[in-house]
Image (cartoon, grey):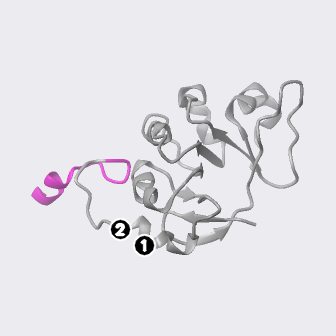
Amino acid sequence: MPNVISADGTIRQDNWTVVARPEDGESLALPNGPCLIPVDLWLAGHEHFAGRDDIGVWFDSHQEPEHLGERANELPVVAVNFPKFSDGRGYSIARLLRERYAYRNELRAIGDVLLDQLQFMKRCGFDAYALRPDKDAAKGQDCLNFFSQSYQAATDTDLPLFRRRAS
């Protein structure tokens, strides 16, 4: 089983399976155990999935979090797919889920997730990271805390550095 890095740097086994979008004409097949399904399919079958703590969703980078909106906290895990490391739209999705929709459960980065992105993802609200398979999860803690201070406000602190120093 692959590993997931938590925001505090601990490494744990990932027991959530990411379910790929079914091809046209195919139906959604859920594996045994906890799984993450495409957000639009969860919304389409919301009444079928309601109340299940073994179903989470994943966003693709082009999808808008307002479609999920206030329903976000019904989900134990929301994942955001980074199709390539240079696609930064997932950072905006994370900030919107945390700040506008007050999502408080696990927010996970999946896809092309690299070690040097972890601290920036954490600042945007992610608290779990499924690294690309060729990356070493043991280096995750160092990467999450590479900088001791940040200049700007983000989800982890609502005050910029100059305001924190003035206090």
Disc 2 is placed on an element classified as loop
Q: Can you give x and y, in whole percent of width and height, for residue 23 in the image?
A: 83, 30
Residue 106 visible in rendering: no
**Residue 143 is inside the magenta segment:** no
Answer with the quarter of the image where residue 71 lies. Answer: top right
How far from the left and from the top, in percent, is residue 85? 51, 48
Residue indicated by mark 2: 146
Q: Are marks 2 and 1 in contact (CB under 8 Å)?
A: yes
Determine the residue positioned at 65% across, 62% down. Answer: 133
Q: Residue 124: image x %, image y %?
A: 42, 48
Q: Dot 2, crowdedness within 10 Å: few (<14), some or many (≥20)?
A: few
Please tell me in which quadrant of the rendered image residue 146 appears.
Answer: bottom left
Q: Tell me if 90 is positioned left or right of 99 in this view.
A: right
Mark 1 Cα within 10 Å, few/some/many (few <14, many 20+)?
some
Residue pointed to by mark 1:
142
Q: Is residue 98 above or below residue 114?
A: above
**How far from the left and from the top, in percent, is residue 21?**
77, 35
Q: Residue at x 49, y 35 (%)?
A: 101
- Quarter that holds the C terminus: bottom left
Q: Nearer the viewer, residue 142 or 36?
A: 142
Residue under the point 47% across and 44% down: 86
Residue stretch in magenta: 154-167
Amino acid marked by disc 2 = Phe
In depth, the one of 72 and 18 nearer the eye is 18
| Mark 1, secondary structure of its residue | helix
Query: Mark 2 to mark 1: distance in Å?
Result: 6 Å
Q: Quadrant of the N terminus?
A: bottom right
Res 140 visible: yes
Indicate whether residue 159 is drawn in magenta: yes
**Pick the front one: 15 or 47:** 15
Up/down of 4 relative to 25, above or below: below
